[in-house]
Image (cartoon, rainbow, N blue to C red):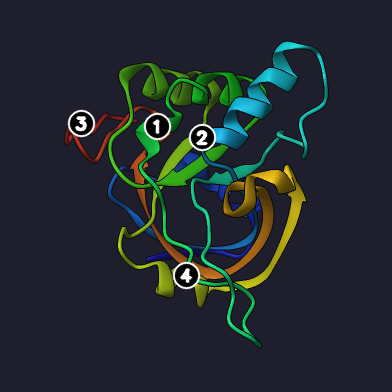
Amino acid sequence: MRAFSSVGELIRNAKTLCAGDEITLSGTVYTARDAAHKKIAAALNSGEKPPFDLRGSVIYYAGPTPAKPGENSGSFGPTTSSRMDVFAPLLYDNGVFATIGKGERSEKVRQSIIKNGGLYLLAIGGAGALAAKHIILSEEVAYPSLGCESVKRLIFRDFPLYVGVDTFGGDIFTRTKLNK
């Protein structure tokens, strides 16, 4: 397992990762699910600024349960990534480096990841309580009317992930391994 102490370190080392590799990630990650993606895409398509700088960002497809007193976050498990596939190429094309979720991605998203040198990372589904233990900060940054689906800025410490699709198109779901 390789540990990355920041998103910048992950970006600098992305080409050394292969589909199926286990990693941990520390650093800033943003959350967005279906409704937030729709709003971000609308902003981009109308020439408006998105609610956070997409360049070099990581988006976690998740929405938390309410935090208990004294906790940074409630349970914070991943949602099914394919629900965001209609928006993902636009976001990768506008600078998103990686997305985190669960499940397979479409061929269109895989091609966008290759084109943009990005990654798709997998969080363990059904382990939202585990994810919450790795969040040291959670703050809402946009779309509060969306409730748990609002955009949040998280800071993770040693969040366990798997590489689902690597920068060369290797895909853990299709067992595609590419020569680099």
Which amino acid type corresponds to the residue marked 4 in the rendered image? Ser
> Which mark is first along the chain, 4 or 2?
2
- Choose between 23 and 40: the one closer to the eye: 40
Q: Return the x and y of residue 78 as percentages of the image width and height.
A: 41, 53
Image-quadrant location for residue 56: top right
Q: Which residue is mark 2?
A: 34
> Which mark is first along the chain, 4 or 3?
4
Which amino acid type corresponds to the residue marked 2 in the rendered image? Asp
Q: Which residue is mark 4?
A: 75
- Pointers 2 and 1 in contact (CB under 8 A)? yes
Among all residues in the image, which is located at the extreme bottom?
70
Query: Closer to the observer: label 3 or label 4?
Result: 4
> Which mark is first along the chain, 1 or 4?
4
Q: Which residue is mark 3?
A: 176
Q: Which residue is mark 1?
A: 83
User: Which image quarter is the C terminus in?
Assistant: top left
Bin the neighbour count of mark 3 within 10 Å (Cα to Cα): few under 14, some 14-19, many 20 and up.
Answer: few
- Pointers 3 and 4 in contact (CB under 8 A)? no
Which amino acid type corresponds to the residue marked 3 in the rendered image? Thr
